[in-house]
Amino acid sequence: MKKFVVISFALLLGFLPQLRADEGMWIPSLISKNIAIMQKLGCQLTAEEIYSNTSPSIKDAIIIFGGGCTGEIVSPEGLIFTNHHCGFGSIQKVSTVEHDYLKDGFWAYSKDKEIPIEGLTVKFLVYMKDVTGQALDSVTNTMSEKERSVQVRKNIKNIEAAASKDNDYSVVVKPIFGGNQYYIYVYNVFKDIRFVGAPPSAVGKFGGDTDNWMWPRHTGDFSIFRVYTAPDGSPAEYSADNIPMKSKHYLPINISPKKKGEFTMIMGNPGGTDRFLSSWGVDNAIKYYNPSVVKVRDMKLKLMKEKMDADSVIKLQYATKYAHTANYWKYYIGQTKALKRLKVKAEKEQLEAEFSNWLNQHPDKKEMYGEALPDLKSAYEGINKYTIAQIYFFEAIYRGPEIFSYAFHFDKLKKQLEDKSAKKETLDATISKFKEEVKEHFKDYNFIVDRNIYAAMMQMFYNDVPKDQQPAYLEKMHKKFKGDWKKYADYVFKKSIFSTPEKVNKFLDKPSAKVLKKDPALVAWNDFYNVYRTMQVEESAFTAQKTRGHRLFIAGIKAMNPDVNYAPDANFTMRVTYGTVQDYYPADAVHYDYTTHLFGVMQKEDPTNPEFIVPTKLKALFKAKDFGRWGENGKLVTDFLSTNDITGGNSGSPIMNNRGQLIGLAFDGNWEAMSGDIKFDPQLQRTINVDVRYVLFIIDKYANAQNLINELTIIKDVPTPVTAPTEIKTTETVPEPVQ
């Protein structure tokens, strides 16, 4: 049944002074500490309505979607909204060349048409709790970092075991504030998730890599899924007998026009920030870490794209891989530029000087925290020596050619084949499982692409990594093939059993530990991995020193400023961030408005560029101005800006109004503030959101999926005019009227 609610209220926000963004990804169970500030910004919710362990609250509509995104429940029957790029891998997984749902989109016009996604899960937070006392039980200041770590891990294991006893919950204990505090997070995991709908990539990924992290943006970044449960409402594996979840709480949708300065709130699962990073850490990012990631990924992207552009099959196979690689390739480019432009290292140095001065004035505090900065300085002097080699291992080897990760996957089988005491049934079960996985691995694999990446990664590793941190095997191959890395790659892919499904299946029909030991891909992997493990051991003392210094520094900063309510760094657990709808000025004489419109899509259209193709039907709807109730003054808003504090993991998070009603989906940050994970800049940092009206327009007018529209609770506010004050102080800023 369609639910369309009209609410009348006074637009008092127009006469309130605009308030700046509030930095922080706040722990929802402690949001009562922030609620007064939120209410001054216009929030009409109570802390209990946002987060409660006893009553349905907004918390119960927020999910971890898959392994790294956020989603929200938007109907009584478990309907999920998340980003298109969050659903991208699942959509690609069920696509074929004949039914390419990435290219063409997909809509289930009835529940029996919804497509199960094998392996996809969503997690609902049941509760969270401070368990610092238990986690740090028996921990003393005289312990070494290794001793401390062992004791904490033991304590955490006991806490998690107790919380998961006699139930099916997923439980994890995570540190905050550098290990000064610990929280437990208990989740209910649902495993029957079905694909309901998504626009074509020409809408959901419009602008592609060119527009990624940029504003103005015109991307309809959304996809739709549904949670199914057993008939009794419990989590269950896929079954035809399962039913749509009966939602504990879901978000109503508000389609009222956006107003500059209006309150916004985002709840999601931000992946990671480093706001307490030291000046030495910033220096490491600028000089070593970021440039290494960018250089390796730049080459991998180039090699994937040249084959994807030439072959539609390869384009589909590598769509998800390319997107994942490109996202943080561009991120680290932007972060480095922003760190330099905003002089973040100098700002950190100033804070460290203030901290040192405070310590010198308080001998008792210096006794407690005085080793923090010396530890950090010394630690990074050691860490810097290994950063390039470690990044190259992760990016060029571990996440480089897939033949490496696939070969490493067979290490378990090799050990069983070598173990003379291994039971035949155990070995047979392993071989059977490997046979089942062959088809899935090679489904999205191309021999030529992987061979080209292999050659390039070997050459880059040899040229860029210090020689004393390279495996001897690499120098041996360099001499054997006279520096011709393409010939070396040809040799590996010709001789290795891991390069084609036929060779893998032939091996599994007659497995041999001797064959695995001699396989050139596995030999190379083992040599790289052994050198990496050696580096880990050599660097471990510096890492421990950094961990200790970081923990002491955070504790000291909090002690220096006891009245400051600090937000802990993100760690992919539920957080709340609040702000307002705002424009911004990225540079002198440059102003960016806070909304974009469908006519901007038409302005960007470029039929020769796959990133800027506009679907024919979308152009027809625009030409006819057939926006329905989703339009505003003859226009259709696509995306909008807010001052909320988000990062990776927040993708797909709901952005809500002052009453907890969905007004859009967060999906990106802006280029000028790419240093935001380290330094939040309230003047520049913005969250880019797809407007929920564009989402509903695509569902309604483009897809004609009325079954989904009818499932939603849709609200539109009708403003009641109020008399403006006879005098407004000149220090106040009155929001401009919506154009």
Image: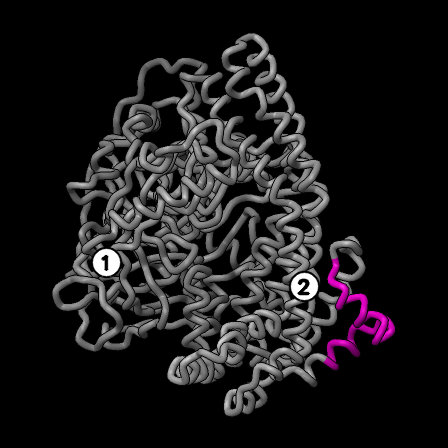
Above or below 630: residue 275: above
Viewer-closest of 614 and 285: 285
- Label disc, if present, on residue 528 of the rendered structure: 2
- Residue 676, quarter of the rendered image: top right
Which residue corresponds to mark 1? 168
Residue lying farthest to the front in this orientation: 421
Instruction: Classify mark 2: helix, strand or loop.
Output: helix
* Badge 1 vs badge 2, beta-carbon distance below 8 Å: no
Taken as a whole, is the magenta stretch helix, strand or loop? Answer: helix
Instruction: Classify mark 1: helix, strand or loop.
Output: loop
x, y percent for residue 620: 44, 67
Residue 381 is a magenta residue:
no
Viewer-closest of 345 and 517: 517
x, y percent for residue 133: 32, 32
Tell me where the magenta segment starts and ends, as one range. Answer: 470-491
> In whole angstroms, how far apart are the C-alphas of marks 1 and 2?
39 Å
Q: Is residue 708 left or right of residue 94?
A: left
x, y percent for residue 387: 68, 47
Q: Is residue 99 visible?
A: no
Q: Quadrant location of the N terminus?
A: bottom left
Q: Residues within 10 Å of mark 2 (few under 14, many from 20)?
A: many
Q: Earlier in the sequence, mark 1 or mark 2?
A: 1
Residue drawn at x 25%, y 55% is: 169
Q: Quadrant location of the C terminus?
A: top left
Residue lying farthest to the top in this orientation: 361
> Which residue type carries mark 1?
Asp
Residue 489 is a magenta residue:
yes
> Which residue type carries mark 2?
Phe
